Image (cartoon, rainbow, N blue to C red):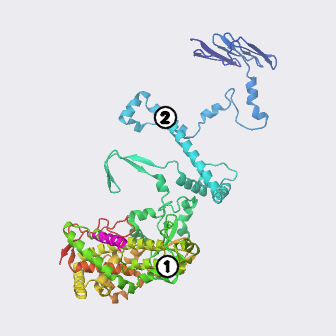
Amino acid sequence: MGHTHQTSVTIGGTSHTSETDGCAAHPSETNSRATHTIETNGGATHTSETNVGATHTSETNGGSTHTGETNGGATHTHTHQYSKWKHSYWRRVGVPGPEPVLFLGNLGTIKKKKRIDLMQIMLNSHKEAVDKDDTSNMVDYKETGAWKNRGLSIDEVTANAFQFLLAGYDTTANTLSFLAYNLAMNPECQEKCIEEVDRVLGQGKPDYDNMLKMQYLDNCTNETLRMYGPASRTHRVVEEDCELAGYIIPKGAAVEIAFYSIHHDPEFWPDPYKFNPDRYDKWKHSFWRRRGLEGPEPTPFLGNLGMIREKGIWGFHTDCRNRFGKVYGSYMGHVPEINVADPVLVKELLVKRFGSFPNRYSRVEPIDEQKGMVFFAKDDHWKYIRNTLTATFSSGKMRVTSPAISDCCDKLMDNIKEQSNDGKDIVEIKRKVVYSIMEDRKTGTTQRKDFMQIMMNSHNEAVDKEDKANMVDIKGNSSWKNRGFTIDEVTANAFLFFLAGYDTTANTLSFMAYNLAMYPECQEKCIAEVDRVLGQDKPNYDNVLKLQYLDNCMNETLRMYGPASATNREVLEDCEIAGYKVPKGCALNIPIFVIHHDPEYWPEPYKFDPDRFLPEEKEKRHPYAFLPFGHGPRNCIGMRLAYLEAKAAIASILRKYRFVRCSETEDPVVLDVKSNILRAKNGIKVKLESR
């Protein structure tokens, strides 16, 4: 303790001395008193002695002497010649470089020219902070929030440097590993990356500017992060009571965002477990612009899905029609979609050129249980199912099933009578009726004459022809063309008709009730017609057909609030639509809501006017300006059934009740932008008043 380390350097007569406290031990210190003498270049002597009293002497040309005394008087002296010789190394082998400084080499230059990286930026911020305020104020910063006006403290630099090192290293390494895996598993993608790297970098090194130009590599990295992103979730703390997605969330709760689930949601990422870098291709989102077709600007990854979520399908397409005309381009995710709101073109595409667009477009591949549904079936399989079901919905079959529909109407009226004092929703009453019928069908032993029984009979015929052992073979060799329905097809289509038919019909009945309540003069005409045509008879296929004014009111309701606001088709082959080249794989969309509210075909389109469907008025407009059930060979096969049951239900109600506005009735009704079908956001609120 208390030893002095003194270093004195004399060069050309100049002496430099420094002194420090402490018990510094010389690196050459050992347990013995070893002495080393070296003679170099003209008699210069180098002597080194270790431990207490060690002496080191070095003499150079010109007599310059360096003497150091350490650890109890130890002295070192050496020449500069050896350092100079080492620092001329690169010059002697012919490699250019900056001139070094004795002992330090180029460290002094490096210190002056600090590295520009994240660490240096944080250190600079810290230095600025210390320059402004001394460390005595650090606690005050934390307590008063004055840290908002300073740079980073040393603690903050240290903490964030540690975080960036820890978080950045592991996650980046993980991403690189999965990217390597994806490229190995998808060599065609890897070859594209290699070609792009060679083209962009050439012989240059990667830097900020040229890395930005490697778009396909960027796509591959993004797709890897989507599939195998290191963060599968994140969360936030709720700082105050709030409402989220219609739910009250109290202060202190946690909100979690499930990244992995979103990244693998087939609604946004078709075939989500497939590595597909093209999902991120900006080139794809310029698809329509390159073809000269106008449309809304897409968002990376989502296309126009964000706008659809914000405005609803109907609102989005209405806005596009007003801005871009009757034909415009949009994007469902990364899939280009051409939209046609021109009735003349709609007829051409859905009927005359049906062979080019026979299938519905689906962003998600249907599961096996759905493939037997007439809605999802494709090509020849669809033709077979459609042909079989067409007989099911013929006028003859509808006439046979009308007693079953009449029974449903009786149950509906009984439920209305029983629950009229409770303010029950008519749709909820109808739901109970339908479920009770389904339960009765499952447990009953008698056959009913309705479309379900017709499909079941078709299945029985299939089983009579071929036993169950042949069912796999039927699917394998397409021999389904020569058989009846399998049990899977019966089940699939029964489920489809119940799910699609129930919700859409109930929705139409709700809007019909709303329109009649809002336009009592139209309702009175309907009541007079029902009384005149039905008398004391129950609604059936034949007398419901005679309710022409009620039919007009139903059509006007379907025009204004049809459940299907759009329909689509898959483009099976390269073609031309409205003068634009449309390649195979795109989607063709028909925005039904837009056509139904186009003032060119429907003056005052938001006004309820059943007289639009009088024969003389229908002749004035194109028949494809009205398509609540679609058009062409692939229109809604249950259209006749939907009309029959909806008109029968309304006629049954109007025989005993009127629909009346109440204090909760909206004017105009607010539509739900989040719903896939057109529905009222807050429900339909009207009263039933006995006649």
Check disc 1: other Cα within 10 Å, few if <14, some if 14-19, many if 20+: few
Q: Against 587, is 131 above or below? A: above
Label ID, residue 648: none
Q: Which residues are magenta?
A: 429-444
- Which residue is disc 1 drawn over? 464
Residue 589 seen by the camera = no
Residue 217 seen by the camera = yes
Classify residue 13 by image quadrant: top right
Magenta-colored stretch includes residue 441: yes
Question: Which three-letter amino acid code belongs to the residue tagged 2?
Answer: His
Q: Residue at x 52, y 77 (%)?
A: 358
Label ID, residue 126: 2
Cβ atoms under marks 2 and 1 closer than 8 Å: no
Question: Which three-letter amino acid code belongs to the residue tagged 1?
Answer: Asp
Q: Residue at x 29, y 78 (%)?
A: 407
Residue ranking furthest to the left:
691
- Quarter holding the N terminus is top right
